[in-house]
């Protein structure tokens, strides 16, 4: 079936008419100053976020310090922790382990290079 | 990946922007700024106000990008929703006299050439748009100017598709009546 009025403006739907009218609106040009303002906002927001991360880290350190050593400046518990770590590491490196020492004189450890090592524990235990 | 989830062309750029990538932020801006500015300009009928609104929209984007969850909503839908809310907030604060002035249909005057004629037509269409209630204007602009689908436009306006269709029908009818003389000419 052929629509007799298909080419007449009256047959145009409201939607088509509005689309046609909207198409007459010119495109917007974006001023460079607006782009610069928006990018400056991005830089400022990024800086704020970085500062807030730094702020959170400082707050966490302060909370830990107050748990360990209330009221002390941050360097005091930090130095104490570093010193205790140093002492622990030095002790681990230089003090021989008590587990390899024995006071049983009957224990003999035989080691032959061509055999698997064997431990003679014939003495009284 | 969820089969029902639509591909979001902005997801990668938003994720990079959230990690502080300036180039990604610039790419996102280049992709959306012209259309957002055109939309807010037509909603607010004030270039300075539209630029401020768009700047505010991007500021929201910069602060929310790090927390953006891909797959929940399409980024563009979220962005336009923020823009529309900005427009509605600003329109609410705007004195009505300003809007009435914007809605006055300007006399296009004599038409010496086609260029001026089309410019005059655009002025009349803009004035007719300004006369529409803000929700109808938003629906018309999203569907006929930004060429969004009904479902997407409804999401952007935070309303049901049926409500959007009702706004569209009323808006189209009003525009057609207001601009009827253009068809006669």
Image (spheres, grey):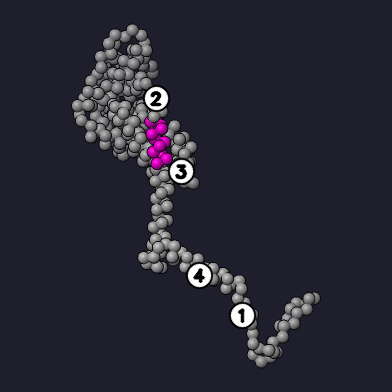
Mark 3, residue position: B20
The residue positioned 32% from the left and 23% from the top of the image is A18
Most distant residue in the top direction: B112
Q: What residue did someone put label 4 on? A: A84
| A57 w.r.t. A13: above or below | below
Q: Position of residue B42 (x, y in %)?
A: 31, 27
Q: Which is nearer the eye, B166 or B109?
A: B109
Which residue is identified by label 1? Answer: A99
Left or right: B6 as drawn, with respect to B171: right
Q: Residue at x 26, y 36 (%)?
A: B89
Which span of residues is magenta-colored?
A: A34-44
State the mark number for residue A29.
2
Q: Earlier in the sequence, mark 4 or mark 2?
A: 2
Element at badge 3?
Answer: loop
Asked if the magenta segment contains residue B126, the reply would be no
Q: Is residue B71 above or below residue B52?
A: below
């Amino acid at each position: 079936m052929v629509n007799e009025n298909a080419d007449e403006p009256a047959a145009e739907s409201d939607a088509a008419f509005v689309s046609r009218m909207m198409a007459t609106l010119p495109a917007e040009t974006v001023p460079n100053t607006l782009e610069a303002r928006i990018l400056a906002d991005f830089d400022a927001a990024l800086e704020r976020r970085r500062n807030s991360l730094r702020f959170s880290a400082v707050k966490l350190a302060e909370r830990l310090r107050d748990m360990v050593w209330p009221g002390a400046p941050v360097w005091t518990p930090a130095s104490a922790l570093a010193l205790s770590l140093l002492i622990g590491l030095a002790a681990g490196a230089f003090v021989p382990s008590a587990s390899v020492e024995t006071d049983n004189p009957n224990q003999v450890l035989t080691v032959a290079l061509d055999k698997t090592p064997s431990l003679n524990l014939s003495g009284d235990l | 990946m969820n089969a029902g989830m639509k591909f979001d062309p902005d997801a990668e750029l938003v994720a990079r922007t959230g990690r502080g990538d300036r180039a990604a932020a610039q790419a996102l801006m280049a992709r959306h700024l012209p259309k957002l500015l055109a939309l807010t300009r037509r909603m607010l009928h004030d270039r300075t106000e539209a630029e401020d609104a768009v700047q505010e929209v991007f500021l929201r984007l910069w602060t929310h990008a790090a927390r953006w969850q891909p797959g929940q909503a399409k980024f563009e839908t979220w962005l336009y929703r923020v823009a529309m809310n900005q427009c509605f907030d600003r329109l609410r604060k705007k004195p009505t006299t300003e809007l009435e002035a914007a809605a006055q249909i300007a006399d296009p005057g004599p038409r010496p050439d086609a260029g001026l004629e089309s410019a005059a037509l655009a002025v009349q269409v803009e004035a007719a748009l300004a006369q529409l209630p803000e929700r109808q204007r938003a629906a018309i602009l999203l569907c006929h100017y930004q060429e969004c689908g009904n479902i997407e436009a409804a999401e952007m306006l935070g309303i049901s598709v049926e409500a959007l269709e009702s706004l569209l029908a009323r808006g189209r009818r009003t525009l057609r009546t207001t601009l009827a003389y253009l068809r006669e000419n």
